[in-house]
Image: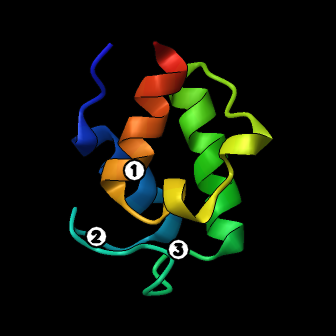
Amino acid sequence: MHVDEKIIIELLEKVINQNVSQEENLLDDAILDSLGTIMLIDELEKYFSIVIPPKDFTHFNFNSIKNINQMVEKIIN
């Protein structure tokens, strides 16, 4: 299943209450903090009816929209 990055952006913007672009480094630029990451995981799991395993809670997976999208697609497929 293909996941539209726009959905990831909408969920992220809901969590952090600000606009983001696809090019931003979410963790490196402190756009997303640890609490925001946990909240985003919750939103992703609810929206996509998935469980994100703790092994996927990595800096790399949550540092960009693209990486979040790829992680979700991997779990779904």
Instruction: State left or right for residue 38 relative to residue 44.
Output: right
In percent of width and height, residue 71 lies at: 48, 37
Mark 1, secondary structure of its residue? helix
Q: Residues within 10 Å of mark 3 (few under 14, many from 20)?
A: many
The tag earlier along the polypeptide, 2 or 1, is 2
Q: Residue furthest right?
A: 54
Which residue is labeled 3 in the image? 32
Which residue is labeled 1 in the image? 67
In percent of width and height, residue 62 lies at: 51, 58
Instruction: State left or right for residue 23 relative to residue 17.
Output: left
Asked if disc 3 and disc 2 are in contact, CB closer than 8 Å, the reply is no
Q: Residue furthest bottom?
A: 29
Q: At 49% across and 69% down in the image, what residue appears?
A: 16
Instruction: State left or right for residue 14 relative to residue 4.
Output: right
| Disc marking residue 20 | 2
Q: Residues within 10 Å of mark 2 (few under 14, many from 20)?
A: some
Label 2 vs label 1, nearer the camera:
1
In percent of width and height, residue 54 lies at: 78, 42
CA–CA distance in space, label 2 to label 1: 14 Å
Which residue type carries mark 2?
Answer: Val
Which residue type carries mark 1?
Answer: Asn
